[in-house]
Amino acid sequence: MDSTQRRYSREQLLSQRGPRSFRGQALSQVAFPLGGIGTGNVSLGGRGDLRDWEIFNRPGKGKLLPYTFFSLWCQPEGAQPVARLMERRFLPPYQHGFGIPTLLAPGLPRLAEATFTGTYPFARIDFADDQLPLRASLRAYNPFIPMNAEDSGIPVAVFKWTLTNPGFSAVQATLALSLLNAVGHNGQIAPGNRYESSFGGNLNEFVRSGDLAELRMSSTRYGKDDPRFGTLAIATSWADTTHSTRWERAGWWDDLQDFWDDFSTDGRLPDHTDADPSPAGQTDVGTLGALITLQPGESVTVPFLLAWHFPNHVNYWNGEESVAGKRLTNYYATRFGSAWEAAEHTADNLPRLEAETRAYHDTLLESTLPDAVIDAVSSQASILRTTTCLRTGDGRFHAFEGCGDNSGCCPMNCTHVWNYEQAVAHLFPELERTVRDTDFGVNTLPDGNMAFRSLLPLATEHRWAFVPAADGQMGTLLRLFREWKQSGDTEWLRHHWPRAKAALEFAWSDANPHRWDADHDGVMEGVQHNTYDIEFHGPNSMMGSWYLAALHAGAAMAQAVGEAKSAREYLALAERGARGHDALWNGEFYVHDVRPQKLADGAPPINEGKPFDGEEPRYQYAAGCLADQLLGQWFAHCVGLGYVLPEDKVRKAVESIFRHNYLPDFTQHYNCQRVYAVNDEAGLLLCTWPNGGRPKYPFPYADEVWTGIEYQVAAHLIYEGLLEEGLTIVKSLRDRHDGERRNPWDEFECGHHYARAMASWSLLLALSGYQYSAPEGRLGFAPKLEGDFRCFFTGAEGWGLYTREANRHQVALRYGTLALRSLVLPDLASDAGVTLNGAPVAGQVTDGVWRAESPLSLSAGDTLGVG
């Protein structure tokens, strides 16, 4: 590594100090998503505030619910009571034209300091205030259990408050949650108080259901098919409670004044049970409190549940007449009829849900991966539970590229963006397979032309009317291969193979107006639409490596379904193509041979920008060092396909990407495009021209920094043995998301929570040397880190922890099941023995692979020992 690029010491890169914590100004940008897959979410702010209410079927960055907060009243024996909003005090700046918005109750007393610690899916806030007689901490989460999409898709947020009495006197306390009944909210309005034209007929009811005390919130105004129809609920299993179904209906700020005067006096609420719909244009705030007595030295944990249910998702993002304005049912609405049903289900199963979520969290944290990697892998898995993603009533998973502040960005299932994502495929493979069902069952024509975006509601008679994307199409074939390897379901592969085969052969088919590989030589020379929203003209290794990897994957899939002849043809074509790419090698990296192409008569339109400047196309990269130049090779490593281009050139090229494109300081970088790294920050540029030859108008985004590309390059560096270089990129990236400058749980590109960032999961794959094939029952590891090593892993239907200590290996299954026939481990001795839960297992080692005499079936709690 060049000395100018040594931003961190080796010790800093390999640090294993544990989860990140945030205090003071570093809390300002923290917003931790709480919600299930496809349910929307609310974020827990770094101060303990609830912000970004995105439960109304669209993004809502900055959207707040008035008078929605936790509060605490407490009184030590013989002393005056103390009442606080359970948030840290406000952080500057305070630049609001009318003061800090009154909907936040900014004048009510808060706590002096907070420390926020988060490793997704758990967030913890420890509060500190010398004036508070109790110590208080909050743990918040939503059930997140890999391989269990049902329990990971509940529309609920769980809050567990721990209160401790450090004093010498008993303390009486009330911990309360207040919530605005927001039914009628369309996700776009920004009410400043209880008054808004979409409110009216809002109904709050107090109910005891089994062990739960609940405030149920609904509306009498909207019918069940209306997009604004829905329900909310707050609940606690605490036995002794107090409540207010609604605050006083009064003008100015009398409603808040009355609540606070009442609550701060004795911690008791009116406990009235009348259910009275709100007047037109108004809604109500309800409060539910837990009454607590704490003896000296005693601690208690008080649970609260916040649940929501807004079943009607409307397609607001497409203009096509066939789909615009059409109603979609949220999948969670097929399981729960109301918010309180979701809350009650969660409460009934909470011990198991929390234990299994904790098992995932703890297993991931047991990994000996560097802090920055654990941080990246865990934090970006949260994208799954933001409004970037949705799950429709048929159970299928769909997603935008990212989220704007008020609407989804770039719909839907964009193949060339989601090519980078690796997290869903390993954590929730059943959901990833539904996307392949859409890709090949709906979006691919019999001739192999694949739409790279989906229209919802799904219908085979309409599809995205745009050119096919070369990278998206080839990458989707690789993802089909990955899902088959992860699941072992060859019948599922066989079902999709005819369209998949057509999609691969579309590269040289006469049906392809863009002539990707018209001469059938394994090199794409034609017009190649791609993830930079333009077309590359002529051979380049970004499209080429996707193509070569797809041919290798196609050969493996063809062999699996009994088409040996096609498999041989694909491999032969891939070998010719690999040799053909030698013409692009400049001694350091692969470049782009720009060959202007005219589209065939009647071909669909291409990019909306000016495509040609005289006789030369704009938006190419020519002699540039492209960060994505080996994108297909990175994916091939992730799925165990090996090298699709010469190993020595691959290593040299990825090393050159780091040397030329990693910038340790951006103060002198000029960029007329979007800015994602600035000032003294460090990051990886999409493209540079170290040898000159920069086009006057290179492709859009060339001067930008995208976290998804940073992750894939970092993982690829690690695959090639360039550990420090890869970790330098990861640590630089995560240091930019430090809580003060950016939210650690929101990596953005074209929108918040951008899907490409889930390439971070490939860091875990690369560092562990993970390989898995469910069809073969094979699991393997080849760690890139020295010494004792532990790492989380997934299989087809289970997950666990791999451990290497000295010359012994262990595979401990923590959840689900795992079928195995062979193990591939580093330095496996020919006489290595294997035990299952301590009992010997018959098998033998050949060619460095241990093969069992009979197939093994592991269940949660089982441990394989090797050595």
Image: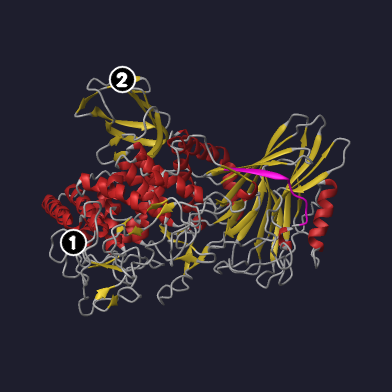
Residue 592 in view here? yes
Q: Residue 583 vs residue 617: left or right? A: left
Whichever of labels 2 and 1 marks the residue nearer the N terminus, that label is: 1
Instruction: Give the quarter of the image for residue 160.
Output: top right
Residue 680 x %, y %: 50, 53
Residue 328 x %, y %: 47, 65
Residue 426 in view here? no
Residue 799 x %, y %: 40, 37
Q: Relative to 633, does residue 598 appear above or below in the rendering?
A: below
Q: Relative to 520, does residue 656 appear above or below in the rendering?
A: above
Tag 1: amino acid: Glu
Q: Secondary structure at mark 1?
A: helix
Residue on which disc 2 sits: 840
Could you say which is closer to the camera, residue 162 or residue 598?
Answer: 598
Tag 2: amino acid: Pro
Q: Distance between the Cα atoms at labels 2 and 1?
A: 49 Å
Span of residues in magenta: 107-117
Residue 727 x %, y %: 40, 42
Label 1: how many Cα within 10 Å (few below 14, some 14–19, many 20+)? many
The residue at 53%/57% (across/down) is 40
Tell me the number on the disc at residue 505. Answer: 1
Tell me, yes or no, whether the highlighted magenta stretch contains residue 112. yes
Q: Residue 738 vs residue 577: left or right? A: right
Question: CB under 8 Å between callouts 2 and 1?
Answer: no
Label 2: how many Cα within 10 Å (few below 14, some 14–19, many 20+)? few
Could you say which is closer to the camera, residue 6 or residue 121?
Answer: 6
Q: Residue 518 vs residue 104: left or right? A: left
Nearer the observer: mark 2 or 1; the answer is 1
Q: Secondary structure at mark 2?
A: strand
The residue at 20%/53% (across/down) is 554
| Quadrant of the snapshot with the C terminus | top left
Tell me, yes or no, whether the highlighted magenta stretch contains residue 379. no
